[in-house]
Amino acid sequence: MKLNIAVLPGDGIGPEIMPQAIHVLDAIAKKFGHEFVYHEAICGAHAIDVCGDPFPDDTFKTCMDADAVLFAAVGDPRFDNDPTLKVRPETGLLAMRKKLGLFANVRPVATFDCLLHMSPLKESIIKGADFMVIRELTGGMYFGEKYQDNDRAYDTDVYSRPEIERILKVAFETAQRRNHHLTVVDKANVLASSRLWRQIAKEMEPQYPDVQTDYMFIDNCSMRVLTDPRFFDVIVTENTFGDILTDETSAITGSMGLQPSASLGDHTPLFEPVHGSWPQAAGKNLANPLAQILSAAMMLEHFGLKAEGALIREACNESLLQNIRTPEIQVEGGNHYGTTEVGQWITNYVASH
Ligand SMILES: NC(=O)c1ccc[n+]([C@@H]2O[C@H](COP(=O)([O-])OP(=O)(O)OC[C@H]3O[C@@H](n4cnc5c(N)ncnc54)[C@H](O)[C@@H]3O)[C@@H](O)[C@H]2O)c1
């Protein structure tokens, strides 16, 4: 298969973790006889420095022309610490999601057996947890009307019926492919936007009789994912709740550096780690490249390349089992491997298996 891949390393640790995913993809291409063509483009703080725009038109065009986008992360403390700035790396992120129509962010949450003991949560609670959070990505408060002056500010949590229906469709269908259990997460006891979500979900329920659908308030859900994560199969929720919930669920997996995600929608699909640009670690060869590498695996699986995705997953699992790990998940007294060493090990594994 030939795939044109737009490659967006972004900021912070992005330029360090992205090459590791590319090396792994190259090894896959060689082994399975595929052709992966990479088209690198700028975004985030780096793009602001170059041309004043965090998601320039050239980058947008590169993404639109590609079969898939492999993205790392954007963000820079220069912008984080100045709330008055109008142009910020994250505005580029939102523009990218909006322009590519990426309305569904799909985030798998699963445990690695050999890391269970490293979670701050009890092994007996998280062992076997395996669920999917589907977060709406282009609506709600992040995109609704905003206002701010010195004394007053607001963000508007606005959703339309078509926006809700299309994400719920993705969620119901995902549940059908998994264990037929969908939890719709909202705050329908307080928020009008949530009440519309719940109303539409209830209208759609009869179309999916093989899916057991339940409803949960976000406050309850943020407790249940930590106290009873095996309850869940597929969670669907709006943009802001999903943003917070998915960072929380990284405690189940063990590290932010292990969680990949896919963003799907109207145009080119995008694959990215859940984590941000971790600027404090930039240039230090500390960042875990697994989330980026596993995002590449999700990308291949999206195009039906199941064996290729499975081999990458096996290589990642094996690196963890053999303690080839970056410092944040290394066992006491174990060797510290850097971003490049872990990436190289996984690439070699793929090439030789
Ligand atoms: N999708 C994105 O591009 C995205 C997402 C979240 C945050 N951000 C941006 O990233 C910057 C930093 O934000 P933050 O500190 O809140 O979140 P972050 O995800 O960058 O880092 C939070 C913590 O997670 C851990 N972590 C993250 N990536 C890791 C990796 N690969 N390996 C090991 N550990 C890892 C580190 O302990 C780090 O301190 C900000 O500018 C923020 O706006 C971007």
Image: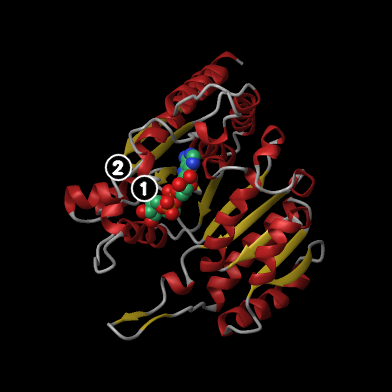
Residue neighbourhood size for the residue with mark 2, other residues' Cα within 10 Å, grouped as few (<14), some (14–19), many (≥20): many
Where the C terminus falls, by quadrant? top right
Q: Which residue is mark 2?
A: 41
- Along the horizontal axis of the image, is 217 left or right of 273? right
Residue 251 appears in the rendering: yes
In contact (CB < 8 Å): disc 1 and disc 2: yes
Residue 12 position in % (x across, y down): 34, 43
Residue at the spot x=52%, y=78% of the render?
Answer: 160
Residue 303 position in % (x across, y down): 56, 40
24 vs 157: above or below: above
Q: For mark 1, give the secondary structure.
A: helix
Residue at the spot x=52%, y=54% of the render?
Answer: 264
| Front in this rendered view, residue 91 or 148 | 148
Residue type pointed to by label 1:
Cys
Residue 69 position in % (x across, y down): 42, 44
Residue neighbourhood size for the residue with mark 1, other residues' Cα within 10 Å, grouped as few (<14), some (14–19), many (≥20): many
Residue type pointed to by label 2:
Ala
| Front in this rendered view, residue 128 or 283 | 283
Q: Which residue is mark 1?
A: 63
**Quarter of the rendering containing residue 200:** bottom right
Residue at the farthest top position? 352
